[in-house]
Amino acid sequence: MSDAFIGSREEYTLSGIDETSLDLNPISQLRAWLDDAETAGAMEPNAMCLATTDRRGAPSGRIVLLRSLDNRGLVFFTNYLSRKGRDLEESGLAAACFWWGRLQRQVRVEGRVERVAPEESDAYFASRPLESRYASAASPQSARIATREQLEAAVEHLRRQHPEGPPRPSDWGGYRLMPEVFEFWQGRPARLHDRFEYRLESGAWVIRRLAP
Ligand SMILES: Cc1cc2nc3c(=O)[nH]c(=O)nc-3n(C[C@H](O)[C@H](O)[C@H](O)COP(=O)(O)O)c2cc1C
């Protein structure tokens, strides 16, 4: 690493993409790249940086895990009263970004968000390990807390109250990001990367190449 600038300079030589290699449906294309990332041994291939904005328009980002994907959109789970939850309730908009270094690929997604049906959140919550259920039920995500002990005591309290596992808190559940724009990016040599944008126009996905 040099003193002046951070990091190395990777040359991206793995592969390229063009109109003929891309699926016409961006959801299918994303699924294929998620599968590739898993096969390539990526850690948490379904991790994505979720960007939201507050009422001033100030952006913030954090990693969440993509938990389901179909033609309606991308579903992730979180606390509805968290910072991101408040942003999403306010703006109804979000962007997400995946980066799979091993494959030299990035995917960007933008669109509107809505809460998933309560039954869908119930089903996912019930599928989580017991410890995760206690943690998400006990943690007032994004709130300031004085000590770690306070958090651990809240978990202990819940454990005693619900030894069989806590019910899903009403302020914890899923959001669906309903995409209007996707971008698939494949690193290429000499910084001449391939980029393809999918934009939903009158109900159909239109694909265009973008300059890197
Ligand atoms: C790999 C990874 C996966 C994560 N997955 C989730 C997730 O699925 N849901 C979630 O609410 N937070 C998840 N987090 C924690 C968030 O990044 C973040 O700290 C938390 O949601 C609070 O964000 P907020 O205060 O902006 O709302 C994850 C963090 C990491 C590093």
Image: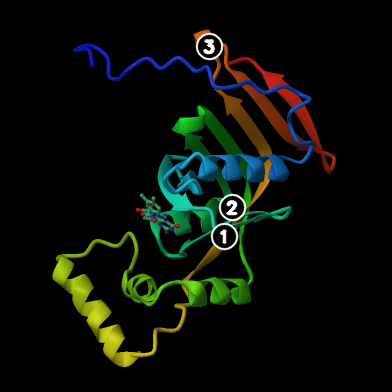
- Looking at marks 1 and 2 on the same chain, the residue that comes earlier in the sequence is marked by 2
Give, as a three-letter code, the residue at label 1: Tyr
Q: Label 2 amino acid?
A: Gly
Given the current orientation, which residue lies at the most extreme top position? 190
Q: Nearer the viewer, mark 2 or mark 3?
A: 3
Picture coordinates of residue 196, whole percent (x, y): 68, 26
Q: 160 above or below 83?
A: below
Q: Are marks 1 and 2 in contact (CB under 8 Å)?
A: no
* Residue linked to disc 3: 189
Q: Quadrant of the C terminus?
A: top right
Question: What residue sits 22% from the left and 71% below the top?
Answer: 151
Gap in angstroms between the C-alphas marked 2 and 3: 38 Å
Identify residue for label 1. Answer: 175
Evaluate if marks 3 and 1 touch, with contact meaning CB atoms under 8 Å apart: no
Q: Which mark is residue 92?
A: 2
Which x, y percent locates residue 56?
45, 43
Question: Which element type, helix, strand or loop, lies under badge 2?
Answer: loop
- Taking 120 as reference, is 112 above or below it? above
Dot 1: few (<14), some (14–19), or many (≥20) neighbours within 10 Å? many
Q: Residues within 10 Å of mark 3 (few under 14, many from 20)?
A: some
